[in-house]
Image: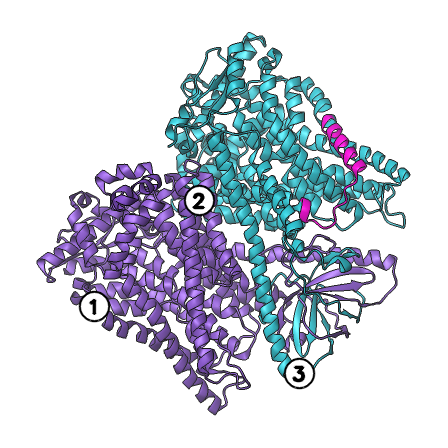
Chain colours: A purple, B cyan
């Protein structure tokens, strides 16, 4: 990002754009000799100056991130929690944007030399002959027509504006990979049917609902004369696609903080993770919709079918690629590299990165491939890694995710003022907010109704309200909207999207927690919504679990999951990991020699205990929750009050066993529900645990704001 | 690196080079309307094609790295050790280079359109008006004159060639930071005088000796007519500067493997780390040497002085910046962030990165600043971090270092065939090898002689031979030489440098181990060269240590170190870290209130035990040695045979206490030497420990090659 090529370097960069390279022989102007050397020095100086400027720009962002980290710490330290860290990053970005916009005036050394020569296409590389020296230029992209005249004003702001492709090639992949890698797999797969329904059908519904509403608004604006440029139906659909992507990151952070019911969590998180993948492929399919002939924005069945084909092709291709590299990594780590944590971690990182590159090189979507690669890595490869590598990979991607996420959000704040071509249209903005709200509603409520017809474990209406409310828009929506801002329609979309992200992160993100606290006190809600089945307290009960209960859980699940579970457990797990039963036990007798050959020695040890390792999680509840570790809203399904003594951050390395305990406990609780019927009197205990404070140096911290509220809640019951 | 801007994107990238932006209004060629839309689609397709190509190119490198990792594992697994991993990476790079050069032929769609227009300077940004659409081009750099005609042949090869600035801005910083962060600080500071002498005087001597010898060769070549272009004395000096940088990475790996005497290790490692910093500043000072007037390559005192001033200014500026950010990070982590490992690690990473950017933005050398930042972070910040963050930061930079290092070395291999403008001149190459050898000799032997006059703990002649032999050239030399390959002289230097790196890594790197084994059997050597005072065995003896011995060690050191040690221990450590004595004890009584205010509560706990934490190391011996952990060449100073049971890789997280033990043991051993005189009969035990094998799954591994040799060595004694 900070790399600036210097002139006078003869080796060619790989970033040069295309295979074409034109040779423009410019008419030589000026004398040779001395002026040549002078030019040389001047060019060097300009290059050096520019390199410094680039470093300074990147430094601005690093400083922003540092400031955000310190403030996050301060918030955690003082137990403020009305604002999430991503919202904080945005505010800082906003402030810097204001300063850059209105505070800094860089003197411009602009010469308005207008030169003319003949060219009939835009080559990727230009070779310019200046006084006998050749300089190479590479194509950066098209600029808007008015750009040429504006260029004086905005150099400074242009400088801090990154190439939008940076988001897609550098910042999004670690975020999405981390989302996949930290998915709670057991609950994800248990709810796979509902998640897929929300992610695929829901996103498509949301996209079309938003698209149609926006088309109505835009048509009205055209009549009123509020529209200054073209805005087609495909643009409306594109807008629908990009704002349908809900942000897993914010959901993850907020819900982890609250220790929400794992099923609700799995639904929301799974939906918003897959959401992103669907939205990105959907938007590219909409862009690919190009009817032949003159009227290029009319409806045409063939083009529509082609777009649909592209959607299916790109999605399944990316999926297959992601899974393939994941499986390959699992195989490599199955047979090799064990006991060399550095090599394992490096290989893991490289293979995950190569998924992205491979998908991009094949014309699929790298971000989508990375998501499924992450899920596969978590499901198979993770089991093969040495304990140290498990920690290392978790920590590495946690860090990358943290940095990338905060970078994007602070950049978002900055963009509000640094972006040059904002088009804020009040009517469009109002329309967009209405459309986004209705689109989300049209996604959640009808689908939940339909899903409830088939689900044993119903999605209650309070569940649905929370899902509706928690649909924040974040990094993916922003990245998709900033990718192309060449036309009037796209610029208006971008500005509006920015406002939607701000609103959802600050208002919805900040409001989710109070809303949950508020909902907790409605009794109907309590019976359906287990807040805070905390992982720490379940350890003891996990020993009680027997195989039949686990099997029970399995049988409660949807049939595709059951089929998948059996296949995965009997064949894939033994083939790809050291866990699971030996293949000799699961394959038919005729495949005996093959099975013996492929089974790992460790698998035989597993045979006796038949360890069900679907329950081992990657997601590190403790590490996220430790940030706000003092308050725990806790309800115990068995009717007893529990005091949660939170481990402080030192506990965050080993989340696995507790999650497993949690999982078993849930299976048990569900079982009880199935046996005793659905009417259970649940005691709610909201416990404010101040014990964690004692571990920290200063003991005179302010008690959390929620203290009074929660305390009174406890007394009321 | 893989980010390619797409056309049709209106937002401006920050990488645009300069403040100037010219507007070239091209004569419009071709009709508007349809052709416009067609152009549009064609440009998009070209951009997409180019993006895929870029992804594929990066993928080549990722695959290379993956292959290298797998082979490294295989080598470790099978206990081959005739080739170091960096040598391996180079071989793979070489193979891919050959394939790309001779195997792949990409059809070129080249049009030789020659256009003409008028321009009298090379602006950073060109705006080209093609059929009414504006495209932005940015300056990539100057290309050689013949380039325009060659361009057809080498597109594919150009594509896999990275911008050389990538090395300086992305790959070198983590390597150099890791070197600084993993420096054995106690031994480094104990030998600081000698290290500085070798690094500063030695590098300058080496640079001038090589420069002079090369000037002789070049003059001779000019007479013979072997020289096809200009080659000035400054070029010779520049060559001398870049090949004087010895590689800490290779030294680190090879010597860690062998568990060499810590003093020799500290000398060699410290020298080669600082070496790099000196060489980079030296080479930029030589480039900055520009006498006024016509004869721009003659001697001029003023220009010379200016260059010297630049050297001092840049070096001290970078040093100050690096230390300043390190201290600032220490202060932040002293007062804040504890108990939030993710935040701590993120801040640590960002502050270290910002050192680089800040130095570059100020016109200093980022890589040098990063080195001193690393040393400062290790000395102060590391003590403030929570244990989890200590692990995380170590592992993070270990991984980054591993990836960057292997990337550079495989890239080096690739460059031998993919670089377009190689100039292999046999006479120059022979001259360079002679000069490099003599330059190294002129650095080591005279300086060692002079240093021995002042040193209590003499540098024996065998020491010196090893230092002479272990001066490998690596990443820094390569990065410096590829940075500028515009002129004939620079191209010849680059090609020659490449060969020198290959030779030293393969021959010297591969030969260091046999050489050490060979030297071990000379008795004089044994008495001066403690190979394998292994960290594991010393644990027991560390309890015997008392304060007087430690103080003894301190008093043996050079006086600048003693002064520094006292100041650091009494004031800086308490001010910046949680370790060290409380300031109330070290500051004069009048500063009481201030001292109480600044001292951390933990420091009072330290007061009783007066813990000397100079001995806590960052460097993780275990993690490096665990890679080749089975063979240990071990000599026990106390005369007893010891069997080293190596911990396998799982032990690599906690290197600290053993290192400390090792350190105390060394202090003790030195003490004995001082008391009993220098004549000690040392027993040498070379132990081949096969126990480590039992931990690994397959027990039928081949015994290592060295087995026979070492075994026979044991019998001979």
Residue found at the far front of this picture: A590
Q: CA distance from mark 1 to mark 2?
A: 55 Å
Q: Does B457 sit left or right of A239 as displayed? A: right
Q: CA distance from mark 1 to mark 3?
A: 58 Å
Q: Is residue B328 visible?
A: no
User: In the image, which residues are magenta?
Assistant: B416-441
Counting from the top left corner in percent of width and height, residue A555 is at 19, 56
Label 2 with label 3: CB-CB less than 8 Å: no
Q: Does A530 sit left or right of B302 as displayed? A: left
Of label 2 and label 3, which has the lower sequence position?
3
Label 3 Cα neighbours within 10 Å, binned few <14 / some 14-19 / many ≥20: few
Q: Nearer the viewer, residue A364 or A404?
A: A364
Q: Residue at x 23, y 68 (%)?
A: A462
Disc 2 element: helix
Are the numbered discs 1 and 2 placed on the same chain, yes or no?
no
Q: Nearer the viewer, residue B91 or A130?
A: B91
Q: Is residue A243 above or below residue B674?
A: below
Q: Chain of mark 3?
A: B
Label 1 Cα neighbours within 10 Å, binned few <14 / some 14-19 / many ≥20: few
Q: Chain of mark 2?
A: B
Q: Does A470 sit left or right of A63 as displayed? A: left
**Quarter-of-image position of residue B458:** top right
Which residue has dot 2 on it? B335
Q: Chain of mark 1?
A: A
Magenta-colored stretch includes residue B574: no
Counting from the top left corner in percent of width and height, residue A385 is at 38, 42
Q: Which mark is residue A454?
A: 1
Q: Which mark is residue B32?
A: 3
Disc 1 element: helix
């Amino acid at each position: 990002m900070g790399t600036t090529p210097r002139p006078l370097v003869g080796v060619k960069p790989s970033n040069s754009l295309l295979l074409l390279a034109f040779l423009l022989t410019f008419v030589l102007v000026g004398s040779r000799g001395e002026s040549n050397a002078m030019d040389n020095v001047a060019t060097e100086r300009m290059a050096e100056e520019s390199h410094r400027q680039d470093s300074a720009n990147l430094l601005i962002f690093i400083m922003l991130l540092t400031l955000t980290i310190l403030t996050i710490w301060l918030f955690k330290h003082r137990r403020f929690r009305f604002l999430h860290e991503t919202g904080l990053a945005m505010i800082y970005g906003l402030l810097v944007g204001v300063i850059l916009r209105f505070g800094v005036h860089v003197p411009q050394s602009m010469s308005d030399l207008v030169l003319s020569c003949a060219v009939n296409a835009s080559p990727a590389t230009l070779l310019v002959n200046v006084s006998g020296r050749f300089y190479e230029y590479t194509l950066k992209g098209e600029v808007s027509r008015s750009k040429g005249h504006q260029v004086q004003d905005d150099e400074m702001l242009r400088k801090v504006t990154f190439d939008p492709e940076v988001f897609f090639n550098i910042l999004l992949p670690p975020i999405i990979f981390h989302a996949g890698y930290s998915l709670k797999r057991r609950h994800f797969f248990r709810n796979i049917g509902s998640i897929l329904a929300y992610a695929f059908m829901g996103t498509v519904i949301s996209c079309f609902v938003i698209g149609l509403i926006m088309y109505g608004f835009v048509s009205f604006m055209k009549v009123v004369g509020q529209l200054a440029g073209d805005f087609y139906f495909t643009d409306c659909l594109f807008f629908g696609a990009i704002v349908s992507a809900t942000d897993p990151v914010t959901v993850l952070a907020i819900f982890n903080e609250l220790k929400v019911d794992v099923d609700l969590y799995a639904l929301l998180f799974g939906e918003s993770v897959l959401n992103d993948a669907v939205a990105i492929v959907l938007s590219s399919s909409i862009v690919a919709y190009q009817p032949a002939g003159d009227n290029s924005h009319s409806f045409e069945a063939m083009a529509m079918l082609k777009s649909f084909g592209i959607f299916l092709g790109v999605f399944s291709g990316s999926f297959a690629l992601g899974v393939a590299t994941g499986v390959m990594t699992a195989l490599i780590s199955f047979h090799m590299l064990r006991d060399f944590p550095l090599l394992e971690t490096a290989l893991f990182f490289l293979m995950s990165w190569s998924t992205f590159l491979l998908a991009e090189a094949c014309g699929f979507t790298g971000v989508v491939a990375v998501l499924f690669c992450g899920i596969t890595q978590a499901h198979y490869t993770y089991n093969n890694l040495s304990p140290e590598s498990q920690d290392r990979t978790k920590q590495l991607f946690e860090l990358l995710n943290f940095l990338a996420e905060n970078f994007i959000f602070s950049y978002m704040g900055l963009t509000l003022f640094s972006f040059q071509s904002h088009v804020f249209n009040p009517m469009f903005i109002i329309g967009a907010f209405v459309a986004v709200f209705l689109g989300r509603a049209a996604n959640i409520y009808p689908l939940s109704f339909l899903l409830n017809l088939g689900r044993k474990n119903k999605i209650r209406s309070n569940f649905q309200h929370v899902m509706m409310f928690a649909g924040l828009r974040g990094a993916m929506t922003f990245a998709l909207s900033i990718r192309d801002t060449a036309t009037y329609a796209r610029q208006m979309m971008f500005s509006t999207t920015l406002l939607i992200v701000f609103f959802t992160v600050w208002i919805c993100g900040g409001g989710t927690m109070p809303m949950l606290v508020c909902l907790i006190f409605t009794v109907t809600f309590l019976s359906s919504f287990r807040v805070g089945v905390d992982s720490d307290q379940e350890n003891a009960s996990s020993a009680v679990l027997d195989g039949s209960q686990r099997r029970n859980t399995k049988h409660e699940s949807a049939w595709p999951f059951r089929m998948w579970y059996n296949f995965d457990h009997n064949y894939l797990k033994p083939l790809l990991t050291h866990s699971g039963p030996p293949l000799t036990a699961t394959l038919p007798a005729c495949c005996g020699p093959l099975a013996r050959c492929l089974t790992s020695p460790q698998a035989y040890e597993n045979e006796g205990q038949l360890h069900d390792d679907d329950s081992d999680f990657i997601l590190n509840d403790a590490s996220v929750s430790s940030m706000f570790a003092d308050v725990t809203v806790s309800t115990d399904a068995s009717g007893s009050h529990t005091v949660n003594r939170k481990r402080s951050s030192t506990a965050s390395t080993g989340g696995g066993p507790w999650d497993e305990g949690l999982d078993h406990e849930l299976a048990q609780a569900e079982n009880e529900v199935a046996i005793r019927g659905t009417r259970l009197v649940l005691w709610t205990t909201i416990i404010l645990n101040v014990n964690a404070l004692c571990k920290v140096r200063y003991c005179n911290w302010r008690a959390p704001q929620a203290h009074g509220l929660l305390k009174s809640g406890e007394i009321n019951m």
